[in-house]
């Protein structure tokens, strides 16, 4: 955000935009929220948006578009093949990443499907700083496995490490020596590491990973879905980058990679995705999969209107004033919650404010899904929809036993340019109330448990009558307030 100081000395994150289209919100009464949460199987994915006051489920596809994006959408050139819109999209991605080849896909996981289908064979190992749910699902679907090589600080809820998403380079070297480069189809860097709290990698660490890959002739792929936040953190926290522009930092990161893919539901403030690549042989290997899974080569399953919005949105992702809004609001929320004693992931990352459910609900065992229980409780307490990022988001082991997540997090995502600071204050207030009443919250158990990506559709029920007691306490404390 621009360097604007407050005369009072109080420093608040300041929006560098104004709101010109609004959507009315509703907040159902607490008894209704409890009923709706149960109808939704205590799974925040299954709530209806009309029943949600603050939707902090994700920042995917729900960021506010700018006036320039909306107006660009009007000039979309609709064609099955050879649309001008596509040419504009390719030119913008080339300008930003400096790579010759580009393939369009309808969203991030579609890129993961194409990449995994093109490169992963049974028995292969894909090293990465940390997995993302859909990435891992595609790799394992093809008989490969994922090795997570994040630095140990990344899994500690609180420390002062500025780059908790970094790769542990000695572990990467050791893994390559152990499995052999021939069993590693690619190394994947995930910018803004989603599942550990949106934590960034440093530019230096990316250089180190790239050097190891070059030494062993390994392909290096960047998942740039959350690159925007990562760029902000590199500029803010990495001394040598302080005087570089966001574009310069992006160009240097891109110069280290063989392939960059992204979800434009995050990077680009729209909906869609793409895969950029440096080498012709990679393009040839993936190209034929696009018409099969996505759509013809000049739209890849995207609407041309969204593609026009991405072109403008990618430019906006290179604007420091614009990309600092998310991380600064998140930092505000995390610091305010920390000040009130609520356990949150620190330093704050991108994507959202992450509440540490292991500590928040230390009386709930992991097999009763503390992060899922906290998500259900927060919707009941305030109509705020967060997302479980813990054991529920994992898949069971082959033998049916639970794979316990290393971190049990409730993610409160901050869609870009969507909420005001007073709405964020409201969410902070309700989380704090829940913290003070945490002893009332109990666990959850599955009623219906899908085998794959169970967190999307699984249905759960509360263990015991804790939700009755939570609603009664809400009424006692808040009277007839919503
Ligand atoms: N990679 C990362 C790092 C992501 O965060 C996501 C999506 C994807 C890939 C897949 O992209 O949704 O366009 O298919 N993350 C969303 C989230 C779903 O809510 O965190 P997609």
Image: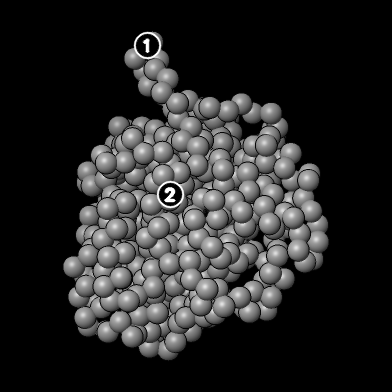
Percent x, y of residue 40: 60, 58
Q: Mark 1 or mark 2, which is nearer the start of the sequence? A: 1
**In this rendering, would 339 be left or right of 88?**
left
Percent x, y of residue 69: 67, 41
User: According to the image, label 1 marks what residue?
Assistant: 8
Percent x, y of residue 70: 71, 40
User: According to the image, label 2 marks what residue?
Assistant: 250
* Residue 244 visible (yes or no): yes
**Residue behind label 2 places its C-beta within 8 angstroms of ligand 1:** no
Would you identify the image quadrant in which residue 316 lies? top right
* Residue 36 visible (yes or no): no
Secondary element at tag 2? helix
* Label 1 Cα neighbours within 10 Å, binned few <14 / some 14-19 / many ≥20: few
Name the quarter where the N terminus is drawn.
top left
* Label 2 Cα neighbours within 10 Å, binned few <14 / some 14-19 / many ≥20: many
**In this rendering, would 211 be left or right of 440?**
left
The residue at the point 36 percent across, 71 percent down is 187
Could you tell me how many numbered marks the image carries?
2
**In this rendering, would 95 be left or right of 177?**
right
How far apart are the alpha carbons under marks 2 and 1?
Answer: 36 Å
Name the quarter where the C terminus is drawn.
top right
Q: Is residue 474 above or below residue 163?
A: above
Q: Is residue 181 above or below residue 1?
A: below
Q: In the image shown, does 436 or 120 lie closer to the viewer?
A: 120
Q: Is residue 305 above or below residue 458?
A: above
């Amino acid at each position: 955000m621009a360097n604007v100081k407050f005369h009072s000395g109080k420093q608040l994150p300041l929006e560098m935009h104004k709101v010109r289209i609004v959507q009315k919100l509703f907040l159902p009464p607490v008894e209704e929220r409890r009923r709706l949460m149960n109808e939704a199987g205590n799974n925040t994915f299954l709530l209806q948006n009309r029943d949600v006051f603050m939707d902090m489920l994700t920042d995917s596809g729900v960021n506010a578009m700018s006036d320039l994006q909306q107006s660009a959408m009007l000039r979309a050139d609709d064609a099955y093949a050879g649309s001008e819109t596509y040419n504009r999209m390719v030119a913008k991605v080339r300008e930003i990443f400096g790579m010759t080849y580009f393939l369009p896909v309808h969203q991030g996981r579609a890129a993961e499907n194409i990449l995994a289908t093109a490169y992963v064979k049974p028995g292969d190992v894909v090293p990465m700083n940390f997995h993302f749910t859909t990435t891992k699902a595609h790799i394992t679907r093809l008989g490969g496995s994922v090795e997570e090589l994040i630095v140990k600080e990344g899994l500690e809820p609180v420390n002062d490490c500025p780059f908790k998403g970094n790769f542990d380079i000695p572990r990467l070297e050791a893994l390559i020596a152990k499995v052999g480069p021939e069993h590693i189809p690619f190394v994947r860097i995930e910018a803004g590491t989603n599942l550990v709290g949106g934590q960034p990698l440093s530019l230096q660490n990316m250089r180190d990973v790239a050097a190891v890959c070059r030494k062993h002739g390994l392909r290096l792929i960047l998942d740039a879905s959350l690159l925007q936040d990562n760029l902000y953190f590199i500029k803010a926290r990495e001394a040598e980058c302080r005087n570089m522009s966001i574009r310069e930092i992006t160009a240097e990161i891109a110069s280290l990679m063989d392939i960059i893919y992204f979800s434009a539901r995050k990077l680009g403030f729209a909906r869609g995705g793409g895969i950029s690549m440096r080498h012709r042989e990679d393009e040839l290997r993936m190209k034929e999969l696009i018409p099969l899974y996505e759509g013809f080569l000049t739209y890849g399953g995207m609407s041309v209107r969204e593609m026009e919005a991405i072109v403008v949105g990618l430019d906006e992702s290179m604007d420091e004033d614009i990309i600092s809004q998310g991380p600064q609001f998140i930092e505000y929320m995390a610091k305010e919650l920390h000040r009130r004693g609520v356990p949150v992931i620190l330093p704050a990352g991108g994507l959202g404010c992450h509440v540490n459910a292991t500590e928040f609900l230390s009386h709930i065992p992991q097999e009763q899904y503390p992060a899922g229980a906290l998500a259900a409780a927060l919707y009941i307490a305030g109509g705020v929809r967060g997302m479980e990022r813990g054991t529920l988001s994992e898949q069971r082991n082959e033998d049916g036993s639970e794979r316990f997540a290393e971190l049990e997090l409730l993610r409160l995502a901050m869609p870009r340019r969507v909420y005001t600071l007073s709405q964020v204050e409201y969410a902070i207030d309700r989380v704090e109330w829940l913290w003070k009443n945490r002893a009332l919250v109990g666990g959850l158990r599955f009623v219906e448990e899908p085998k794959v990506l169970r967190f999307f559709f699984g249905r759960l029920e509360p263990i015991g009558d804790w939700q009755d007691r939570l609603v009664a306490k809400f009424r006692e404390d808040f009277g007839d307030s919503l």
